[in-house]
Image (cartoon, rainbow, N blue to C red):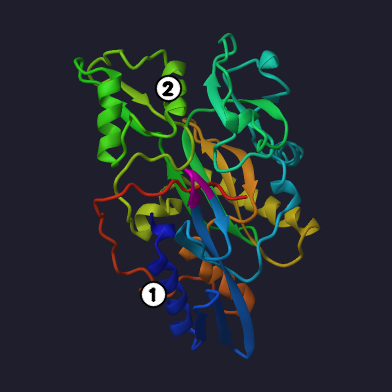
Amino acid sequence: MFIAITMNHMRAVKAWADAHQAQATLDMSSFVLEVKARNRYYRLYPQFLCEDQGRLSHVTAITPHVTGFIGWRPYQPLRLTLSSDKLLFKNALGEAGLATPAHWDSPDAAQADFILKRSMGSFGYQLAGPFHPSQTLPNLSAAMTGPDARGVIYAEAFVPGRNLKVWFWDGQPVHTQCQPYPLIEGDGQQTVRALVTQRLKDAHQDWATYPERDAVLTSLSFQGLTLNTRLPRRQQAWLDYRYGRCFTSKAMTTEAQDNAWRRLPNEVQIQITQAGEWLKLAVKSDVKAPVLCSMDGVLDAAGKVWWLELNSNPICPPTAYFAMMASLFGTPAQTPAGAFATAAKAMPGRAPLQQGTGT
C-alpha cells in the first residue's frame, strides 16, 4: 500500500526539503531523521511494523520481526486518554454530537445486529462477529478471552458499509482511506469454499492455513452462508468487515489510488472536517502540541460517517509530512509539485500486510 512503502516517505520528505531549502539527515543507527530549516531544528522519530507469530504491532526500533517502515513523527510514541478505551472515546463522541454506533454492556442486551469488542483491543484482533441478536454465539477466541485480552467486552451495533480511516495532523485531515469489504461473486456452480479458496489464492494465501478463518466463517454465517453453499450467479458475499483485510495481491499503489479524500462526496468531507475540529480540541487535555492521530469509522450507504475508535500512534501516511512540516517550520502545508509524480506499479507477489489500526 502507498503508506507502507518506505520510498514514499523518503520522497515526501525530500520534496518538502527541496522546496524549502532544508537539510534532512538520516541516522542509520537509529533511523532518526534530523531536519534543519529556517533556523529551526527537529528530530523525527521512526516507527516500524512488526509481525511476530501472525500478530502485528508497531515498534520504534528495527528488530528481527520488523517487516516495514511506517513513518516518522516529531515525538516519541504517546498514548492519548481517548485512545486508551473505545468506550471512553464513544462516550466523548456522543457528548460532542458526532455519530457512533449504539452499544450495550452484553450481547444479551443487544437490540440490533452487533459485533463483540473489547474496549482496549487493537489491530482488529480482539473482536468477534457480526451476529444477529437471536443468534447463539460460538465460543469466543483466545484473543477475546485469553490472558492478553484487555478491557471489558461490549456489544456494538454492526453498521455495514465501507471502512473509513482518516489521518489528522493537529485536527486537519491529511489522508483518507475508504475500503469496501472484500467480496466473492457466485456463478451458480461453484461452492463458497471454492470461491473463497480462489480469492485467497489470488492474494497468495492458502485457505487451509489462513490464520483468520474464523472471521471469514463468521461473516459468511451472518449472511446465511456456509462453505458448501452454491452461490447463485452474480450474487455477492463479503468475507470480512474489518479494516485492512483486502485479500489482494497488489502490494503497491499510488497516492491518488490510496488517498480517497478527493473522491469522497462533499457532505462526507464536511463530516470528516467537523470530526477533526472536535479532535483537535479533545486531545489538548493530554498534549498541547500538534500530534498525528487517526480515527476509524464506517461510511454507510446513506453517506453517514459512524466513528468507532481513535488511534494515537498510527502509521504516518507520506502525505502528512507537508502539514507536519508546516507546523514545525512555518512553511506552506500544500504538497510540493511532483512529490508523488512517480507512479508505483502493481507488483505480483506477497499480499500486502494487514494495516492494523495502531494504538
Frontmost residue, 352 versus 67: 67
User: Where residue 217 is drawn, which disc sits there?
Assistant: 2
- The residue indicated by pointer 1 is 337
Which residue occupies 55% across, 51% down?
57
The answer to whether 324 appears left or right of 217 in the picture is right
Direction bottom: furthest residue: 39
Q: Which is more N-terminal, label 2 or label 1?
A: 2
The answer to whether 112 is drawn above or below residue 118 in the figure is: above
Depth check: give the residue in front, 214 or 158. Answer: 214
What stretch of residues is rendered in magenta? 51-56
Instruction: Sort mark 2 into few (<14), some (14-19) or many (20+) by Cα contacts within 10 Å.
Output: some
Asked whether 268 or 85 is in front, the reply is 85
| Number of marks in picture | 2
Residue 154 falls in which quadrant of the image? top right
In the rendered image, which quarter is residue 297 located in? top right
Image position, residue 153 (x, y; %): 69, 28
Residue 166, horizontal then vertical, whole percent: 54, 50
